[in-house]
Amino acid sequence: MDIKGKVVIVTGASSGIGEATAREFAKEGARLVLAARRIDRLEELAKEIRAMASGAEALVVQADLSQLADIQSMVEQTLKQFGRIDVLVNNAGFGRLDWLEKLDPLKDIEAQLKVNVHGVIQTTRQVLPVMIKQRSGSIINMCSMAGLIGTPTYTIYSASKHAVHGFSEALRREVQPWGISVSMLYPGGVTTEFGQHAGINRKTKATTPKFLLLTADQVGREVVKLVTRPRAMRIIPWLWSLSAYLNKLWPAFVDYTTITRFTIPEREVELGIKS
């Protein structure tokens, strides 16, 4: 797909990967629809995009992706402004990381599933009839490595991303005959606001090694590549592919390593291993 002039919806565009992705599409001459809850940030980004080139277009839509009415309004405003939808980037999402029994049933569990899973499904469902009618389109779903490997304290976040994985795989086989591509992107650790809002508080200080950390700009560029050269799955950086294969082929080893090096040290107070 030649991106220039194409209409691209980016959800969660107010910060992090969504914001960087919008900039990358703008550089390629796309017409942007920026959707998120924080409209002040969206307005700032839209202003920046319009300043990139004469005639650059960016539609700002305040939307809570856990609300179907907001999703429907976003699609309606897009069609009213541009008359078509060529690319959907389902990026909006958040994580709450803690032991399952400590997660709040509503704020941490239900809300996370509403945005990360229902939001992706409902947004795609609203956009799909437009793309089918056009006989063309590209859908990019942000899955995260948590959608391939489940780790302690990621129970709900990982469940949501595994759900997106299954949804994307089935959807790809539904819509391909209509010229619509569905791609899944699996980034490892990214330097965004995610960690600030996830509630991470680890005694072991375990984190992604610096040499494996990605910037939001790097992820944004990969999203654009999946539109120009579609593929079913893309893991970045590629070294994480080894972890995914190991998790699939030798899960007992991954279980043992994770439990002994992370779970038990983190749980030592609750388990009474140390006073």
Image (cartoon, grey):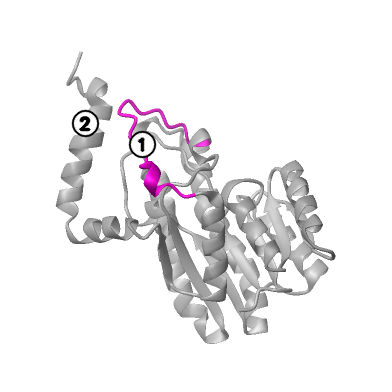
- Marks 2 and 1 sit apart, C-alpha to C-alpha, by 15 Å
Q: Residues within 10 Å of mark 1 (few under 14, many from 20)?
A: some
**Image location (x, y in percent) of residue 78:** 76, 65
Q: Is residue 21 visible?
A: yes
Q: Residue at x 46, y 62 (%)?
A: 185
Q: Against 270, is 139 above or below?
A: below
Residue 186 circle label = none
Q: Earlier in the sequence, mark 2 or mark 1?
A: 1
Residue that lies at the very extreme toward the top in this rendered image: 275
Q: Is residue 205 magenta?
A: yes
Residue 211 or residue 3, whichever sits in front:
211
Question: Element at badge 1?
Answer: helix
Question: Does 138 sit left or right of 160 as displayed?
Answer: right
In the picture shown, does residue 65 fall above or below 99? below
Residue picked out by circle 2: 264
Q: Is residue 33 left or right of residue 131?
A: right
For the N terminus, which image quadrant?
bottom right
- Magenta run includes residue 238: no
Residue 6 percent coordinates (x, y): 70, 73
Element type at mark 2: helix
Q: Are marks 2 and 1 in contact (CB under 8 Å)?
A: no
Q: In this rendering, would 245 be left or right of 55?
A: left
- Give residue 59's quadrant in the image: bottom right
Q: Amino acid at mark 2?
A: Ile
How many discs appear? Answer: 2
Q: Which residue carries the number 1 mark?
A: 100
- Residue lying at the far front of the rendered structure: 211
| Magenta-tinted stretch | 197-214
Front-lying residue, 53 or 194: 53
